[in-house]
Amino acid sequence: MRVLPLGLLRGAIFSCFVFLGFCLVVFLNAGCSPGNLTLGVHSPPPPVGNAFVFTANAGGNNISGFSNDGAGNLTAVPGSPFSSPGQPFGLAATPNNAFLYVSSFQNAQVTGFSINPTTGTLTPLTCPVASTDAQPLKIAINPAGTLLFTANQAGSVTGFAINTTTGCLSAISTTLTDSVARGLTIDGTGQFVYVVTGGGGIDLFTITTLGTLSRQAIGGFDSTTGTMLAVKAVPNLNVLLATDGGSTNNLRSFIINTTTGALTPIVVTVAGSSPPNPSAIAVNLPANATTPQFYVANTASNNLTVNTVAADGTSGASSLTVPASTGPIDLAVDPAGRFLYVANNGASTVTAFNANITATNVNSTIISFVGTGAAPESIVVVAHP
């Protein structure tokens, strides 16, 4: 695993002077605009936005938490960063935004936290240990908020039942995959789990009534290139997007059969048409549910790919390439669809983007950035519960 330098730090310096019997309070705020001076009054806090942003920092063994303001800027929530030993890797929140879960790569377990709906502060849940197979990576939670699955580098998926009152996890089963399980997603109906593997395939599993997984050969797919990296189901479109991280580095889209889960390939971009290491996908459904923009984080190229996807699985006529920071590895959209947040593994930062990316603003969409713990691997945006 990558262990990189600690992220950027912010501070504030306060000084008091007494002169001629009067108290003059001077606040010097050190932030993105150094040297802002306010005399005699407190600067008002930024208006609270509609979301909290969390990153799992594998190099720092912690989770960074932020609140966004109305312009997309991020401010650390009280108590951040929060301890999370064992190289925290994957992150996921329940649909009701009450609980946050993180996978521990070294310790082979999932840890849960409750999210304070006002402040965003995380409190560890008091639960029995939820053990996974070796080296869990990404996490997915079903739309009902009752089941949680981890993709394990050992070559498996581990499933848990979520107690919707306490947030505690109860183990259900561990199911083998074809190869190293890189990432996973659950379709909008909550019936199917799709797993991209290091062997170049997409494994399809049906979720049974007991929460166990049943492998379905009909939905199998093999890119023949060696490594699939990321996968994302677009719920209301019944479309699946996946990235191929093999020598071809391209994007693939599929139509999901909502009865069987089978995948029908629609788009296979030209080999080599996308930058290296397309490691994560996010879709902006709130902004446009008909032909939403989707974003791909290209870790080795320090940029993002942006395009649109339609209900028939086709992409827009041309994609955009957006400059990013060092090592963009995961990304997520805020609940209103206004802002895109990108976790940068190499820079140990989160970058805030204007999510409405067009050909005219492609080089000027960055709003701000903020430091995280070392080497963030995953990011999640959580609406206020």
Image (cartoon, rainbow, N blue to C red):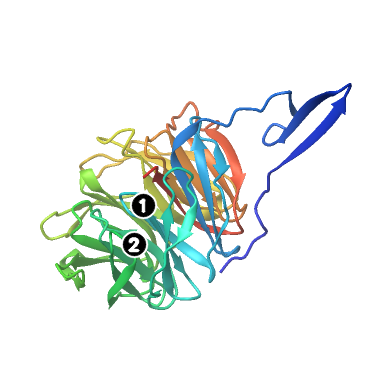
Question: Type of residue at label 1?
Answer: Ala
Q: Eyeballing the image, is 224 above or below 384?
A: below
Q: Quadrant of residue 192?
A: bottom left
- Residue at image mark 1: 98
Q: Label 1: state its secondary structure.
A: loop
Q: Position of residue 236 (x, y in %)?
A: 22, 43
Q: Eyeballing the image, is 287 above or below 95?
A: above
Can residue 54 be seen by looking at this rendering? yes
> From mark 2 to mark 1, how far is it between C-alphas?
8 Å
Q: Eyeballing the image, is 191 above or below 13?
A: below
- Residue at image mark 2: 167
Residue sitting at x 53%, y 71% = 86
Quadrant in which the N terminus appears? bottom right
Q: Position of residue 79 (x, y in %)?
A: 57, 52
Q: Residue furthest front?
A: 21
Specify few, some or many for label 1: CA neighbours under 10 Å numbering under 14, 14-19, or 20 or more: many
Decide: marks 2, 1 in contact (CB < 8 A)?
Answer: yes
Q: Position of residue 232 (x, y in %)?
A: 32, 53
Question: In the picture provided, is 24 more to the left or to the right than 57?
Answer: right
